[in-house]
Amino acid sequence: MIDSAKLQELVSEYALSCIVRNRRPSFHGLAEELDISYNTARNAFRGEYCSGKPYTNTPSPRRRIDNRDFEIIRRLFLEA
């Protein structure tokens, strides 16, 4: 799982690169920056997986982003 501080750092760097390139953030770009899949980036933004199923508080061992950090992802796209 990506540490909260590291996630914030990576998302901030990605946001800055979007500003420099005069581009809006995208799930594809964020996924590449975080070394995760497009679906993982999109699902973290939505807070759910598989058509409307919310994440549980018991994460899968393979989960890369903690539920508590979904807001970091949301802010990136809502503030853009």
Image (tube, grey):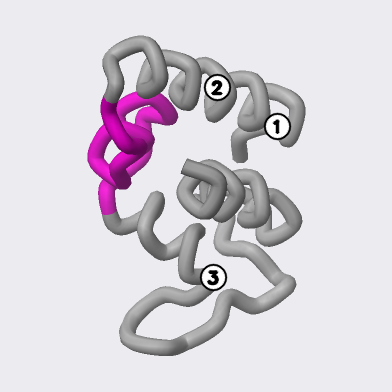
Rendering coords of residue 32 (x, y %): 29, 29
Element type at marker 1?
loop
- Position of 68 with respect to 71 (left or right) is right
Write down the region rendered in magenta.
Answer: 23-38
Q: Mark 1 packing: few (<14 Cα in 10 Å), some, or many (20+)?
A: few
Mark positioned earlier in the residue sequence (1 or 3): 1
How far apart in space, not on screen, are marks 1 and 3 (Cα)? 18 Å
Indicate whether residue 6 is drawn in magenta.
no
Residue 13: numbered disc: none
Q: Disc 3 marks which residue?
A: 47
> Count of labels shown?
3
View extreme (top): residue: 20
- Report crowding for label 2: few under 14, some 14 to 19, many 20 or more residues within 10 A (C-alpha): some
Residue on which disc 2 sits = 10
Of all residues, the one furthest to the front in this rendering is 22
**Quadrant of the image occupied by residue 34:** top left
27 is within the stretch colored magenta:
yes
Residue at the (69%, 49%) spot, across then down: 69
Position of 79 with respect to 25 (left or right) is right
Residue receiving disc 1: 3
Q: Is residue 45 left or right of residue 35?
A: right
Q: Nearer the viewer, residue 29 or 16?
A: 16
Compare marks 1 and 2 and give the one earlier in the sequence: 1
Residue lying at 39% horizontally and 50% vertically, measured from the top left: 41
